[in-house]
Amino acid sequence: MYLDNENRPAITPQLALRVAILGGIALVMFGIIFFRLWYLQVLSGDKYLAQARDNQIRDVLIQAPRGKIVDRNGNVLVKNRIAYAVSISPDKLPKVQTVKTALYVRLARVLNMSRREIRTTVRTQLKAQPFAKATVKTDVGRDVYSYILEHLSSFPGVSVDQVYLRFYPHHDLAAQIMGTVGRVTAAELKLPDFKGVDQNDRVGQTGIESSYDRYLRGQDGAARVQVDASGNLRSELTKKPAIQGHQLRLSLNMEAQNVGQQTLAGHHGAFVAMDVRDGSIYALGSAPTFDPNVFSKGVKESVYKQLNSTANGAPLTNRAIQGLYPTGSTFKPITSVAALSCGVITPSDIIFDNGTFKEGGIVRHNAGNVSNGALNITNALRVSSDVFFYTLGADLGTACGGQQLQKWASRLGIGHKTGIDLPAETPGFLPTPSRINRRHKQYPKLFNLPWEPGDNVNLAVGQGYLGADPLQMAVAYGAIATDYKVVPHLAMRVEDSEGRAIQQFSTPSRKKMGINPLFRQTIMNGLYAAANDPGGTSVDVFKGFPVKVCGKTGTAEKGLGRPDQSWYVVLAPCPNPKYVVAVTDETGGFGAQTAAPDARRILAALFGIKNQENKVVRGSSRTL
């Protein structure tokens, strides 16, 4: 049987045109594909081959441990511990939202967190630093570390890195001095001091950790490793080891620091112990305090708010350098310098204290309404006569230009930062006529009256608008005792890991005060009498103490029904002191009841005197 081709219909011109068009399109498409393949394999082959090889290579950052911080005797105050942190790399996160959510759900089960908590943590960190790793959880257990590494394909973008966390073995000891570390901020990365810092590094944020971060911070290392297609480690190619940060030695005496904190435990206040000759800080503390270990892993916002809340006593506040306190009668030696230097009184002049002082229609009395009779300036300091110093304050308001009290207080450091090597120090507030009048216009509710003569009277006894802190008072007393104002400092030297000195910090220069030696001796005699002679305000506290001291009590009234604030500033040994100790308790009452016994305990620790710490009971001025 034969096919009859003659009966087959001929292809129409329209169909032929369509076939030609389709064939042309197919030919063009094949041409494009062929050209693309030729371009990728021939022209760009080397480029993509290199990229493929690079995909097998990973650069891994090796975090450098920070240096230790030790006290003057080498006791470790801050060190490191090894931990594991779970992080997410933003460039490796799944782009599809459902896939990303599934990843967060799986990770939440492993980390014992909620999916929402993980998502919020990642978003917050990536918003602050878009290209840095987001740390989901720090200090995870070894089981979590092993599980994630064994199931990396189920956790795209997730890594578990070995990190060094700061560890404070003595917990709250010197917490406000040590400070905290935290992740470097985007703003800090732009500063010259943070050149070379990785955006995931943790740096000093407060305290000594911040002030000397450049020494404590080490140099990160790096490892180049080869991985397979699943991202699993195959081999280490090269490695640049990390270099640990230097050790920092402070002038702190850990025993004195510990005694100071124990005395103020459960109270609100602060203390300072300083070398009057060079400004070395032996102890400095604030209560209430906190455990800086809570910041090692990254603190939650709720916890941070609690630590900063005034309702909880604001533990993050360093009252020793940030307190804005009336100082009570501890200000009287400063008033004495001004009055003697101005000439409103001489060392031998007598003022009769009948227990009452009248000025501008206002009547003021001594504490307890006592009358001290005829007093020279030495005996006025011994018994802490308010009437005597009210009189000097009124006279200084008109004599020598009217602001000699403010001039000398300023010269001695009141109303200025001391320059201590800690961040966030405040200058305090020294009231002057111009400042009060200016603030009266700006804040009429807070400063309800312009400057009046009575304000100078109040200032003479450490009351009124005055705002000072224990460190300022310690510096002022040291300057009166030696005629030199020092710059307080904590850092002694930078050391290697074996404790060998690398860099010794020079002692900041002292400033000559130019106080007449006779005037200084007169004041020191008064401070000695206050702690040693009959009728002295703190003689009972230091009875039997083996070291002679010169000290002054202070009881600052805060008004509005609030308890009085207790103060004591002491120099020892007298008459040629090495140490000055300043203590304040915000609700301690009379200076001899609370602050003076605390100062005695700190001095006992500084001098290594045993069995002296509990000779005097807080709340009583009598020796047991």
Image (tube, helix red, strand yellow):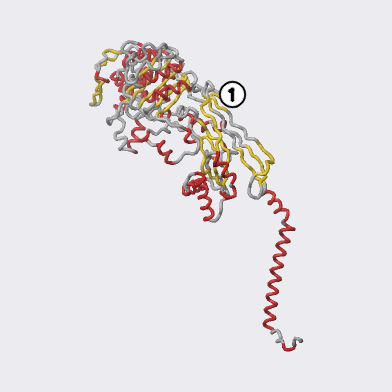
User: Is the residue 221 above or below the residue 262 in the image?
Assistant: below
Q: Quadrant of residue 555?
A: top left
Assign a secondary structure to mark 1.
loop
Nearer the observer, 213 or 253: 253
Q: Quadrant of residue 160?
A: top right
Q: Nearer the viewer, residue 141 or 565?
A: 141
**For residue 506, what is the image quadrant?**
top right
Name the quarter where the C terminus is drawn. top left
For disc 1, the marked residue is 499
Q: Residue at x 34, y 32 (%)?
A: 436
For the view shown, which residue lies furthest in the right direction? 2
Rendering coords of residue 415 (x, y %): 40, 28
Viewer-proximal residue among 56 and 145? 145
Can residue 272 be seen here? The reply is yes
Count every numbered label the image shows and give the total: 1
Label 1: how many residues lie within 10 Å, few (<14), some (14-19) or many (20+)? some
The vertical placement of 604 against 420, above or below, is above
Q: Work out which quarter of the rendered image holds the N terminus and state it.
A: bottom right
Q: Position of residue 473 (x, y in %)?
A: 40, 23
Q: Residue at x 52, y 33 (%)?
A: 166
Q: Residue 185 or 103: which is nearer the viewer?
A: 103
Q: Is residue 91 visible?
A: no
Q: Is residue 388 above or below residue 4?
A: above
Instruction: Give coordinates of residue 22: x percent, y percent.
Output: 68, 75
Q: Is residue 395 left or right of residue 147?
A: left
- Give the residue at the far front of this rendering: 1
The image shows residue 23, relative to residue 35, as above or below, that is below
What amino acid is at disc 1?
Gly
From the viewer's perspective, tell me whether residue 60 is left or right of residue 351: right
